Image: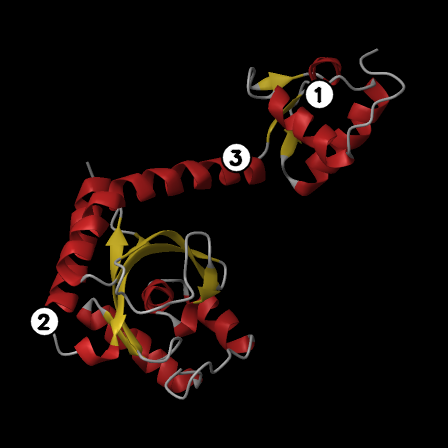
Amino acid sequence: MAGGGGDERSVAQKLFAIAEAFAAKEELTLTQIAAAANLPVSTAHRMLASWTEWGGLERTDSGSYRVGIKLWRLGARRTTAERLRAIARPYLEDLLDATEENVHIAVRDGLGAVYLERISSPNAVRVISDVGTRLPLHATGVGLVLLAHSPIEVFDEVVASKPRQYLPNTITDPKALRRRLAEIRATGISRSVEEMTPGAFSMAAPVVDAHGEVVAAVSIIAHVERLAEPQFALGVRMAARGISGALGR
């Protein structure tokens, strides 16, 4: 029997040990998992039941275990995010050189936009977004682009959540928001002026993968006094197209 008295690992650590067992082999028996995780078979069985109920693992016809769809999706999402961030970096750097403001790339996570990367110049307008930050879809440039290209169910959930009006320009009315999203789809760009950050505007454009699906959004956040300068709209479009092209290779 694997494991014994005096195991001071937390429940989470034991669960992670079970997950790590699948790094070496795709399908494992209960005994193999218990040995790999250094757990008593009874403890491993109990924890495997929790993993299986959640969907992180699944039972095979032979009674062994393999990685389930939820755990697989988490790993795939991380790999995709890391690849997207690496591909986007040079295009974001070019965009930064052209604008000397804040440039981002973000992906949708539920009803929020999660920022995978942000680079800024010393004189850029101050913003609250940073790598790993999760901000609402309805009030950010990247979020509006992602919402515009999301299933209608996502829009319905945003409206049902009673979105917050951060600043006077933040659009929360369902009809006005629906018109806004239609405009973004038609023009291929989102323009936001003082909707999340006072004194700042944002321009964002969609990034598409090899299948034509919108998987991310690129944005610039700059001082509102620079709104009329032409390089922002052109730059964000070119960056989004460049990243999209690189994803399709």
Mark 1 surroundings: few (<14), some (14-19) or many (≥20) residues within 10 A:
few
Disc 2 is placed on an element classified as: loop
Disc 1 is placed on an element classified as: loop
Picture quadrant of residue 59: top right
Q: CA distance from mark 2 to mark 3?
A: 43 Å
* Residue with the most extreme right position: 5
* Residue with the most extreme front position: 122
Tell me, yes or no, if residue 105 can be seen here.
Answer: yes
* Lower position in the chain sequence, tag 2 or tag 3: 3
Which residue corresponds to mark 2?
A: 230
Q: Which mark is residue 72?
A: 3
Q: Residue at x 46, y 52 (%)?
A: 132
State the residue in front, 125 or 231. Answer: 125
Q: x and y percent of residue 151 in the render? A: 41, 63
Disc 3 is placed on an element classified as: helix
Q: Is residue 205 left or right of residue 234?
A: right
Picture quadrant of residue 126: bottom left
Label 2 or label 3, whichever lies nearer to me, is 2
Q: Residue at x 64, y 32 (%)?
A: 57
Tell me, yes or no, if residue 59 can be seen here.
Answer: no
* Residue with the most extreme bottom position: 168
Which residue corresponds to mark 1?
A: 63
Q: Amino acid at mark 3?
A: Trp
Quadrant (top left/top right/bottom left/bottom right) for the N terminus: top right
